[in-house]
Amino acid sequence: MIERYTLPEMGNLWTEAYKLKTWLQVEIAVCEAQAELGYIPSAAVAEIKAKANFDPQRVLEIEAEVRHDVIAFLTNVNEYVGEAGRYIHLGLTSSDVLDTALALQLVASLDLLLQRLSDLIQAIRQKATEHRHTVMTGRSHGIHAEPITFGFKLAGWLAEVLRHQQRLISLRETIAVGKISGAVGTYANVEPRVEARACHKLGLQPDTASTQVISRDRHADYVQQLALVAASIERFAVEIRNLQRTDVLEVEEFFSKGQKGSSAMPHKRNPIRSERLTGMARIIRAHAVAAVENVALWHERDISHSSVERVIFPDACILTHFMLVEMTDLVKNLLVYPENMERNMNCYGGVVFSQRVLLALIDKGLSREEAYAIVQQSAHSAWNKPEGNFHNLISKDPRVTQKLSPTEIEACFDPQHHLNNLEQVYQRLGI
């Protein structure tokens, strides 16, 4: 399932071949910078650029012997380049290449995530516009509260994903950082001007003060932001799951022709996609914990973070990408049942309008405590009873009819009152 959605885009960014490609990009950018500053011959750089290549399988063969991935890579590249290869990696340490190249992967992944997030924003905006006036019950604690519209519910989703868009745009600047500062970051064998030029060529900024590695707070920020995106998608998915319950059935995941929901029960139409998204969010949250654990490295560097990042970065990026694609499709094709929304809102005789009756009685001179007791008695008498009807009980209560006319009582049960100010929310979001 994930492969079908992600490998053409996100998955390709996390292959071994793509990783080695970014390593070579960094090495060549450094060579170009050193040549521009007169440290190595320009002719050698031209030869390096013309001949430099690698074979992922050959790199693995060499690594099996030397037990060092960067040395294995450089050895293989030099097999292609020849004599000019002695200028590659001049004055660098492995982390210069690894961390700068990782930044390229993370930026490329983030650009894809921003594209898919934009798709989700558009899908939610469209569905919110479509259901701007579709009245339904708002719920708190899972219990009927007061009327809202389905468009308003989606407006909350839209505001949330727009915040994620701003966070990811800001995150791009945070993560688009390289370091070409040598062992322990002192520039002892490669000067800062080389770093500045090389990073510029790669579309990165030099790290402000790297050690032998770029500090992992940046990377923890990256995974935490993806975990936030996943948490929002989970929130939307859980909402769909709750609204799809048989006893609610106000929305439903699209159920295609020929699809089957259960091996045993032919009637089943399960919210499997929303459940899948809920589970995936748990994985990304766990990766966020691992990313934070990576921040505390020994002194100027160790490699305890490396093994963790080989798992969490591909996983977090690919899963977040899949979740965005999946949720976008789910929202676009979501089945919405306004008739069921109206039915649920009016069950038990419209108890969701209790506050309007309460306020109307207070406006007629009753104390809040007295009005609350009157309304609560009728509401609880109607609550959860097949024949319960709050509207009828209120309309027959002499304590109410002495204060409110039939027209005034009817006005309390008009859902439009609850929607009058929603236009301001829609306008803020451009819906």
Image (cartoon, grey):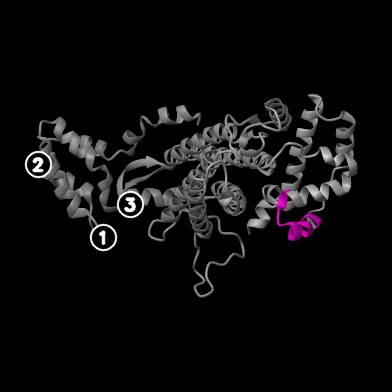
The numbered mark, 1 or 3, whose residue comes first in the sequence reads 3
State the SS at label 1: loop
* Dot 3 amino acid type: Gly
Looking at the image, residue 356 sits to the left or right of residue 242; the answer is left
* Dot 2 amino acid type: Arg
User: Which residue is denoted by mark 1 in the rendering?
Assistant: 386
Q: Which residues are magenta?
A: 58-70
Looking at the image, residue 32 sits to the left or right of residue 421; the answer is right
Q: Nearer the viewer, residue 117 or 297?
A: 297
Residue 326 visible from this viewpoint = no
* Dot 1 amino acid type: Pro
Marks 3 and 2, how far apart at CA:
31 Å
Residue 142, which numbered label? Answer: 3
Q: Nearer the viewer, residue 187 or 243?
A: 187
Looking at the image, residue 29 sits to the left or right of residue 177; the answer is right
Location of the N terminus (image quadrant): bottom right
How would you rate the neighbour count of disc 3 (Cα within 10 Å): few for under 14, some for 14-19, many for 20 or more? Answer: few
Residue 125 visible from this viewpoint = yes
State the SS at label 2: helix
**Residue 114 placed where, x, y %?**
60, 38
User: Which residue is denoted by mark 2 in the rendering?
Assistant: 399
Question: Which quarter of the figure has residue 147?
Answer: top left
The single residue placed furthest to the bottom in the displayed view is 264
Question: Which quarter of the figure has residue 403?
Answer: top left
The numbered mark, 2 or 1, whose residue comes first in the sequence reads 1
Magenta portion: prevailing SS class: helix
